[in-house]
Image: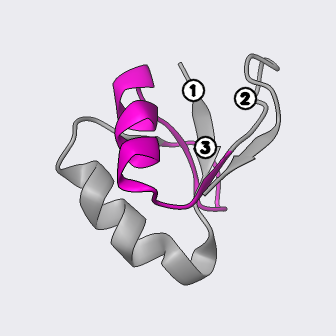
Amino acid sequence: MPFIRIPKDQWEKVWDFLVGTGPISRVSQEPEYFVSERQVQLLRKKKLPFDLIDGPNGSAPKRKHA
């Protein structure tokens, strides 16, 4: 499951979009969430900013997507 960080200055816009696409799990006090692969694809398609980051188990590579 992908682990993303939403930029604080874009949080509301990205969050509103994600809520409409399926379940989201917040994993820390920071704006960091587990999302589905489909949600990552939709974020990329809409060109919404997010960072794909290492999850708690190190499952995802660190890459910036915007």
Which element is circle 1 on?
A: loop
Give yes or no for residue 27 being in the magenta stretch: yes
32 versus 2 height, above or below: below
Residue 23 in percent (x, y) is at 28, 35
Q: Which mark is residue 4?
A: 3
Q: Residue drawn 73% across and 29% down?
A: 55
Q: Would you identify the image quadrant in which residue 56 lies?
A: top right
Residue 8 in percent (x, y) is at 60, 76
Relative side of 32 to 58, left or right: left
The nearer-to-camera label among 2 and 3 is 3
Q: Would you identify the image quadrant in which residue 36 lies?
A: top left
Earlier in the chain: of badge 2 and badge 1, it is 1
Magenta residues, as a range? 26-51
- Residue type at mark 1: give it: Pro
Kindly indicate whether the residue at mark 1 contacts the one at mark 2 (C-beta within 8 angstroms): yes
- Residue type at mark 2: give it: Gly
Q: Residue drawn 75% across and 38% down?
A: 53
- Viewer-proximal residue, 6 or 25? 6
Location of mark 1 (residue): 2
34 versus 27 height, above or below: above
Distance between mark 2 and mark 3 Cα atoms: 8 Å
Location of mark 2 (residue): 55
Which element is circle 2 on?
A: loop
Q: Residue drawn 22% across and 36% down?
A: 22
